Image (tube, rainbow, N blue to C red):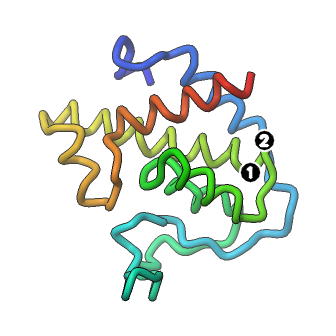
Amino acid sequence: MRSLAGEIDDAAAMAAWEAACDSRWAGDPVWLHGDMAASNLLVRDGRLAAVIDFGCCAVGDPACDLTMAWTFFSGVSREAFREHLPFDDATWTRARGWALWKALITLEAARHLGGSDAASTTPFGWRHRAEDVIDALLAEQQALR
């Protein structure tokens, strides 16, 4: 966050991060993919056919697999994604933290390497630029206050 000072709302980002860090998964550990992104999904005839690339597979908190809510979906599709999954508000708070972390490191890397924000997210299957992901996360966090 420090390296992006002035480009993002530092206070709002820190509030979202702290809220995520203050939340804990109370359920049993579950299998998670660890890198759920559109580039790891195969679709056939408009339907999900397979999930690939299990290199980050682990057991733990399912919140990390929900980052697609912000990197891939928006508006009504994001609401539908969230509505159809059986997770509580605390899980979504941690998911915002995971998505914020991914968007921050992606944006910082793009700035450091001199590339564009869009070019840094497209290979991962993100539909949104890292800056837009951060803006959406922070707006959502603000609305919850």
Q: Where does the image place residue 115, in percent across and percent down from the top left?
A: 14, 38
| Badge 2 amino acid | Ser
Residue at 72% of width from left, 28% of height from top?
A: 144
Q: Residues within 10 Å of mark 2 (few under 14, many from 20)?
A: some
Name the quarter where the C terminus is drawn: top right
SS at circle 2: loop
Q: Can you give x and y, in whole percent of width and height, for residue 75 in the image?
A: 52, 45
Give the residue displayed 47% in from the left and 16% down from the top.
9
What residue do we see at 50% from left, 56% from top? 68
Q: Are marks 2 and 1 in contact (CB under 8 Å)?
A: yes
68 or 143: which is nearer to us? Answer: 143
Name the residue carrying label 2: 23
Residue with the most extreme left position: 114
Q: How many marks?
A: 2
Q: Earlier in the sequence, mark 2 or mark 1?
A: 2
23 left or right, relative to 135: right
Residue identified by numbered label 1? 91
Q: Position of residue 29 (x, y in %)?
A: 77, 69
Q: Nearer the viewer, residue 139 or 116?
A: 139
User: Judging from the image, what secondary structure is the residue with disc 1 in?
Assistant: helix
The answer to whether residue 52 is above or below residue 144 is: below
